[in-house]
Amino acid sequence: MGSDILSNSIYKQILKKIKEYDEIVIARHIGPDPDAIASEVALREIIKYNYPEKKVFAVGTSVSRFKHIGSLDKIDESILAHALLIILDVPKFDRVDSAYKPRYDYTIKIDHHPCDEVVCDLELVDTESSSTCQLITELIYNTKLKINKDIAATLYLGVVADSDRFLLSYTTPRTLELCAKLLNDYKFDLMPLYDNLYERGINERKFEAYIINNLTITENGFGYIKVTNEIIKEYGVDSSTASNMVNNLNFIKELKVWAFSSYDEKSELFKINIRSRGIVINEIAERFNGGGHKFASGARLKTESDVDALFKTLDDACKE
Ligand code: AMP
């Protein structure tokens, strides 16, 4: 996609709808990553910057680790009249955090996850895009929307985080072109962005060492670890810390696919993060009620035997 005629018209249609509505709610997926939060915060700020009279809210549970990206809004959806809902970085409504579709007049989706269904009235979906922030950046450069330095920095941060610093295969010439354009046009400072994204306490580094030391690697090239809550407590980290570390195992020669399981006490579910260096894993994750990208997927499972069954299927896929 990018700047061809078709996508150009979708950007214009999105802008037309934004202009049409005075109340706009922006939502993203549960268990957000930096791209999910950066895209909703950036889009809210873009709309406010260009249309200060509009009421715009970026909703969802806030995550203390990502507070540096921007604050989120709490709203009572029942008082909204004729509002527009924009969902970001999420393919279907079952994983949208804090927005209930029937409350809205019109819905838009901007996302880079594969999805075989149309779930919104208007959709900008590009599975070749590195990130949702890249798609929002396309929206800027394909319309007359203006942004400032802070918004540019937020968009850049989302692209860097989701492409894992331009390491993942979704990094294309267009990704680099748009990032260079943002940097060139708005001249924001990179170092504070990287400090916020990558600075870690020594306890987290030790926890990472624990994961590497205790990872089981099968003869088929599948690596896995079940992180228990005792270990989480021992290292003074939280249950999402393992999830945030899953990309750090990229480029280990012996691994084709790797997965972490951690138990979330709040939801009483096992959260699974899966990554791959070539074997398509999202179709496997979907069979276990999860999903995601071809080489980066996840699932939430009820029982430990479900976890074992998923891990066995991933190991079998490595064998094949
Ligand atoms: P994560 O390992 O949490 O970073 O997730 C990797 C990718 O899989 C992201 O694109 C998520 O949106 C997607 N994903 C994670 N968990 C699920 C799930 N339970 N259902 C569908 N997609 C998921």
Image (spheres, rainbow, N blue to C red):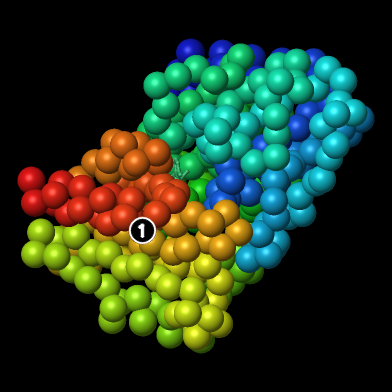
Q: Quadrant of residue 275?
A: bottom left
**Residue at the spot 85% in from the left edge and 37% down from the top edge:** 76
Residue highlighted by disc 1: 304
Q: Nearer the viewer, residue 145 or 208?
A: 208
In percent of width and height, residue 226 lies at 35, 68
In percent of width and height, residue 205 lies at 45, 81
Q: Is residue 8 above or below residue 73?
A: above
Q: Nearer the viewer, residue 73 or 77?
A: 77
Q: Is residue 255 above or below residue 275?
A: below
Three-letter code, disc 1:
Glu
**Residue at the spot 44% in from the left edge and 64% down from the top edge:** 262
Q: Nearer the viewer, residue 38 or 83?
A: 83
Within-10-Å neighbours for mark 1: few <14, some 14–19, many 20+ = some
Q: Is residue 252 above or below residue 311?
A: below
Q: Is mark 1 within 8 Å of ligand 1?
A: no
**Visible residue check, residue 49:** no
Secondary structure at badge 1 equals helix
**Residue at the spot 35% in from the left edge and 76% down from the top edge:** 211
In percent of width and height, residue 257 lies at 23, 55
Side of 34 relative to 57 (left or right) = left
Which corner quadrant holds the N terminus? Answer: top left
